Image: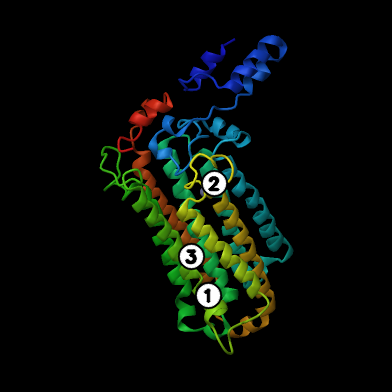
Amino acid sequence: MATQGQLYKRRGHALPPSSVQLTLSALATATPPQTIMLSLIRLPRVFTINQIPKVFHEDGIISGYRHPRSSATDCILSLFQLTNETLNIWTHFLPTWYFLWKLGSVVLMQSAWRDSFTWPLVIYLLSCCIYPLASSCAHTFSTMSARARHICFFFDYGALSFYSLGSAIIYSAYVFPDKWVNGSFHRCYIPIAVFNTVVCTGLACYSRLGLPFLQCNHDTIKRFPECQSPKFSKVIRVVAFAYPCLFDNIPLFYRVFLCVGDGCTDNDTNLLHYNHIALAFLTGFLFATHLPERLAPGSFDFIGHSHQLFHVCGVLGTHFQMKAVEQDMVTRRPWLLEHSIPITLSNSVGAALLCVVVNLTIIILFSLPLLSAPAYKDKTCGRSPQKASAKLCPCC
Ligand SMILES: [Zn+2]
């Protein structure tokens, strides 16, 4: 039978086994019949910021990093081990099931396919399932390699972009204030929202590596990565998500903050909308500021750092948004059916499909230069975290 060291090397790591593995090894020696079982239970070792390439660094997070060339199995095992990504994964993986349950109940119990008035809600709930699922997958598998990390987060951005369109589609259907219903802005609203998703995904992907093939391709190091201009990159990414979000909320902001007189749709639902708006701003604030870990680097590596709080606030915001929209949908249904733009395939399912196709195209375009990179580059950098730091990405 292979020794611990041989097994470790086979998995592509050059580092000594972690303390957990040593303990398991000692136990296995003491009880031979359990040796095989125990040697199979190996929790991957975690590293500090100085042991991994810069492309994996997170602001204010000092420890708890997974191996930068983790196997898929190690990534899945890390779900059950405390690393700096564990709560990032779970805070989006569990809500995915909540939103899936909501989607299932609408589709199955309300016979949504027969009632076009509920189509926007179905699309929105689908987007609410996709964005946390894509995010939890991205956080799980982002340490398989540098290029896997970029591609994982390209999909994460695409899913967030689709969620912003899902929000626009339900706002158009159920949330627009009476005054604006069927006006010129209302008629242009969804086409502009579709266009915004292209801007959002394109800018967010651009913020990681620059333009595909021009600034980022497999044989040039003249990249525009976040490791060269991290602040500028971050600003672009914040703008990429804030801009479509602010645009989507124009009718809601007008309704709850600015509108006076008749036709403002001032009903009980506004309280739920306020909760959603407050959480949305808090979510954006956490994403942009990296608080609290920026104030005390290393103190929130595992629990309480801004990305976890960002996930939690985002999901709570989505929950209140969903409740508010459902209430608007029920209470305003007769009036909207009579006065609003009819809900058709083109302004609901069609817009969503167009968004998916265009966004997938953008993601593929940004991923192609990474996928066509010579495989050896990634491999040679993967023997140990320290070597990876020097070779994986020359600009990092
Ligand atoms: Zn995340």
Q: Residues within 10 Å of mark 3 (few under 14, many from 20)?
A: many
Mark 2 Cα shell of 10 Å, populated few (<14), some (14-19), many (≥20):
many
| Foreground disc of the pair 3, 2 | 2
C-alpha distance separating marks 3 and 2 = 23 Å
Query: Residue tagged by mark 2?
Result: 305
SS for dot 3:
helix
Query: How many residues crowd mark 1 within 10 Å: few (<14), some (14–19), many (20+)?
Result: some
- Disc 3 marks which residue? 245
Residue positioned 49% across, 18% down in the render: 9
Residue 140 lies, in percent from the top left, at: 54, 40
Q: Position of residue 15 (x, y in %)?
A: 47, 20
Identify which amino acid the numbered label 3 is placed on. Cys
State if disc 2 and disc 3 touch (CB < 8 Å): no
Mark 3 vs 2, N-terminal side: 3
Question: First in sequence: mark 3 or mark 1?
Answer: 3
**Side (left or right) of 227 relative to 62:** left
Q: Label 2: state its secondary structure.
A: loop
Percent x, y for residue 177?
A: 57, 81
Q: Quadrant of residue 17?
A: top right
Q: In the rendered view, tell whether residue 233 sits above or below residue 353.
A: above
Which label was assigned to residue 253? 1
- Of circles 3 and 1, the one toward us is 1
- Residue 228: quarter of image: top left
Amino acid type, callout 1: Phe
When asked about the image quadrant of residue 20, the answer is: top right
Question: Among all residues in the image, which is located at the extreme bottom?
Answer: 262
In terms of sequence position, does the residue under pointer 2 or pointer 1 come before the other?
1
Marker count (numbered): 3
Closer to us: 37 or 393 = 393
Which corner quadrant holds the N terminus? top right
Secondary structure type for disc 1: helix
